[in-house]
Structures are given as structure tokens and as C-alpha cells.
Image (cartoon, helix red, strand yellow):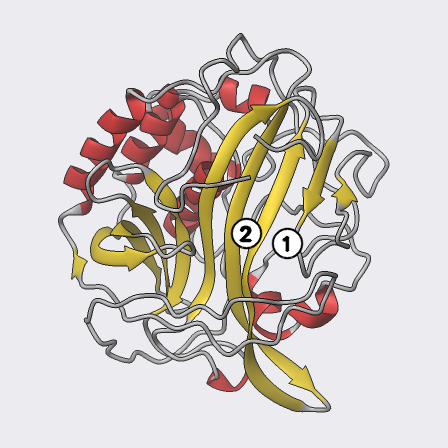
Amino acid sequence: MNLDPTRPRTANRHESGDLPATEEHDLPPGRHQFHKERLMSQIHDDRRAAAPRNPFLRKAILLPAATALAGALAVGALLLTPGGAQGPGDLATGPALTTSIGTVDAHGAPRLLDRISLAAAGADAPKGRAGQYLYIETRAANTHVRAVNGVSSLVSVPLHTRQTWRSPDGLEGWLIEPGTTEPGGITLAGPDETGNTPKPHLGAPTHDYLATLPTDPDALLRKIYKETEGQGNGKDQQAFTTIGDLLVESWPSPQLTAALYRAAAKIPGVVLVDSATDAAGREGVAVARLDETSGVRTEWIFDSKTLTFLGERTVQVKGTGGEGGLIKPGTVVFTHAIMVRAFVDGIKVTP
């Protein structure tokens, strides 16, 4: 499959027709949930563990509190280490991923998000034929603390491709991700750890669940606050994290996408960052929020000209994180770039 590395792709226009509402669910064993505390210190063991995990979402960042430290306000590119073997648990071999920290405009986010929401509202709606699967291909990498024989060090899972397929009814699915699954991938079908069919929610949304969400920004934000109450490091940070997960790991309608951006503009502490680079090396402008508890900043990266959503990254910008404070400012904790979103005719079929 030949991809244009400069921008995400969407489904071709011939893949049209109304798509039946999709239902997703919590997933079977085999996937790291990207809880950040584990990401920092236990990811190597967690990737081998058999506990049920949801491979679609990365939850709130949960790092130890750190003392304040002024970060450099320079513009720079992400330094990624390519390569890595296929198979669970064997990719965490690279050096730490680092970047320069972009300059913050504390008042620019609402204006930018207004422009982004207008662009999103005019995009083509996700469409597919009955029986097709939603295919999402991303590029991802992360940095974490790994302990071997009592010695902790900072390592990275280098840049790699992650592929998911989800059926319209949510009963079938597949995941292929080096370092998380075997080379052939794992099934996403089956009940949750309790043996029940999971009910979709904001933390594990489905296509039909997304279709039920309000597209009025105020009503949408109220729902997000209500359903995520008590999660993460404060309600505002968790709301921002939840919206980011919806943008990266699903394919909302243009109307809902626009509403998500307008809702984000109403969250206190959301700022504009003048420069950020996604996992595919595409440079853009970012909308971001600093988690004051952990000192990490989550950045949504957009093409500066088209305002297309490129991906998301989390950068340590204040204090230190991880065991022993090994994660210093400028460390890219997680980065995720959207490459392809399309409807395909079956599992393991690519556009």
C-alpha cells in the first residue's frame, strides 16, 4: 500500500453508501491500555500480561507530581528511532524520543479551534457499505522507564504502524501492532472480562454511540464532564484527554467533529502551540493542554494550511516524570499520527 506521507487519507468516494451504526466494546487480553504510570515503569511487563485491555484508547496520564521547571521555548522536530522487531514486548529498545518545546499562546486556542471546527464541518462524512469494516492505520511511538535487574533506564518503543479493523456491528475486529500483538495480530471479538457484551460509552465509543452524542458544544461538554467525573487528573484535563481519544481512535461525523473542537475551546487551560511535529514527521500547529499534576502537555497537531487533524502527542514540558525522574522536559512520552481512515471489505484488507 502506497501512502502519501504528507497527509491522512480518507475513504474513496466510490466507497459510499450509508454505514450501519457500529458498536465497539472492551477488548480481550493482549493489549496495553496506555495508562501512563504503567507506560512509564511497567510497560515491558504489561505487554506480556494477560489482563483485559482496550487497544483503542489511551487513558488519562497518571504520572507522579513533579516540581516546576522552565522549559525551553524553541521550535524543533521530533527525533524518532526507526525499526524494531515484530512480536509482543520486544520493541522497547530505542533511545528516548525527544523534541524541542513549542511556544505557547495562552489566548490563541479559541480562534484556532473556531477555524478548525469550520474546516471539519465541511469534510466528507464517513461512509461505507453494509458489511464493510472501518480501517484505521496510524503511526505510533512512545518513551517509558524500564527496569532490568533493579536498574531503571529510559527506553522507547520506536515508530511503528498500528492497524485496526472494526465491523459495523462491533462484534468483529482485529488489531495488528508490533510489540503488542504477534505479527498476525489478535482478534477484538468476544465479550469483556465479565463475559458480557460491553455497553459503549465515552471511554470505549462505538460508531452508533458517536451518532447519539449531541452536536451542540455546550451539551456535548456537559456530557463529557458528567461521564468522566472522577477520572484522570482533574475534570478539565480528563475532558481534553477524552476528546483527543475520540479524535484519534474513531471517525466521528463532520458535525460531531466540529462540536468536539468547539467544546474543547470551552475547556479552561487549552492553549495554542506554535509548532509541533507528529509521529510521521509532519509539522503543524497544535492545540494543547498542560496537565499540572504530571507536567506533561497533550498536543493535538493540525496542518497549518488545511487545518486537517494529523495526530496527537504527549510531551513532558514541566518538571520530571517516571521512576527516578528520568523523563525530562522535551521527552515525547507518546506520539500517534493518523495515516489512513477508510472502509474496507474485510479484516486484514487495506485500502
Of residue 152 and residue 321, the one placed in the foreground of this image is: 152
Q: Residue 289: x percent and y percent?
A: 31, 54
Q: Quadrant of residue 94?
A: bottom right
Q: Residue 214: x percent and y percent?
A: 42, 20
Q: Earlier in the sequence, mark 2 or mark 1?
A: 1
Q: Is residue 241 left or right of residue 188?
A: left
CB under 8 Å between discs 2 and 1: yes
Look at 61% across and 43% down and name the residue there. 163
Look at 49% across and 70% down and name the residue there. 81
Of residue 272 and residue 194, the one placed in the foreground of this image is: 272
- Image quarter (top left, top right, bottom left or bottom right) of the N terminus: top right
Asked if one can make out residue 10 in the rendered structure from this viewpoint, the answer is: yes
Q: Quadrant of residue 145?
A: bottom right
SS type, badge 1: loop
* Disc 1: which residue: 33
Q: Residue 55: x percent and y percent?
A: 65, 47
* Disc 2: which residue: 59
* Identity, as a three-letter code, of the amino acid under mark 2: Lys
- Image quarter (top left, top right, bottom left or bottom right) of the C terminus: top right
Of residue 238 and residue 333, the one placed in the foreground of this image is: 333
Q: Residue 156: x percent and y percent?
A: 55, 72
